Image: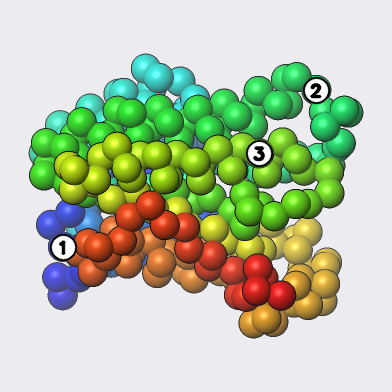
Amino acid sequence: MAGRLAGKVAIVTGGSTGIGKGIAELFLKEGANTVICSRSLEDIQKVASDISSDNAEVMALVCDVSKSDEVKDMVKKTVEKFGKLDILVNNAGMNPAREATLVDLTEEEWEQYFSINAKGTWLSSKYSIPELQKAGGGSIIMISSISAHIGQNLVGCYNSSKAAQEGLVRSMAMDYGKDKIRVNGICPAWVMTDRTREVREKMIDEIKKMHIIERPGTPEDIAWAAVYLASDESTWVTGASFAIDGGYMAK
């Protein structure tokens, strides 16, 4: 089985858990050699072992996407290993650590959100784009959030940092469309992951009511959208954001 991504090389940041892990696992099944990264060597090596596939090769790297030297090294090692880069999934992100008004939020908290969600996305794209250009084009996928498009109580910093990602989707699509580099976003609503399961199961009835399709999403729901945007099936799609949200934003 060749797969929809056969012959392609991908980087998935924040690949040790949740949506990132789900995307990496499906990319491998669809034939893409895939690099996954996180800040913990032990975590990322375990995930690489768990999701390994006969259909493609996985490589685990330690990378803090807010640090330019580490991002540059991640891209360099990817190309040294696989010879090129076709796909970047900017999935690494910081979720709301606590509820706070913008008055109560500390400067340190604001900088943390933007360092990972906005700066990390920019750095990963900055160092990947030259390799995508060398490859004759490719796909950059932002894992953003419906929170980029709506108002929500007490998480204004998170929402703002995700809106920054959405701005990058459109700007980078315009800047690099001439190079056949497509840039798109995926905006999930409530997704059930191993990390969030305990909290979200306690409020499952409320979560179901938020969505037209009365269940939380799964990492696989998001991963299928990422496969489409990474594949040649979406060669006329750029500068777009897709609400993969069970109908949350339609209500």
Q: CA distance from mark 1 to mark 2?
A: 46 Å
Q: CA distance from mark 2 to mark 3?
A: 15 Å
Circle 2 packing at 10 Å, graded few (<14), some (14-19), many (20+), is: few
Mark 2 residue element: loop
Residue at the disc numbered 2: 106
Q: CA distance from mark 3 to mark 1?
A: 36 Å
The answer to which of 163 and 48 lies nearer the viewer is: 163
Residue located 78% across and 52% down the image: 152
Q: Is residue 21 left or right of residue 53?
A: right
The answer to which of 69 and 226 lies nearer the viewer is: 226
Mark 3 residue element: helix
Q: Is residue 69 left or right of residue 209?
A: left
Residue located 59% across and 53% down the image: 145
Mark 2 touches mark 3? (CB < 8 Å): no
Mark 1 residue element: loop
**Vertical placement of residue 237 versus 161, above or below:** below
**Mark closer to the observer (2, 3):** 3
Mark number for residue 6?
1
Residue at the disc numbered 3: 160
- The amino acid beneath tag 1 is Ala
**Mark closer to the observer (1, 2):** 2
**Vertical placement of residue 207 versus 76, above or below:** below
Question: Which quarter of the rendered picture does the N terminus lie within?
Answer: bottom left
Residue 84, position in %: x, y? 14, 40
Quadrant in the rendering for residue 192: bottom right
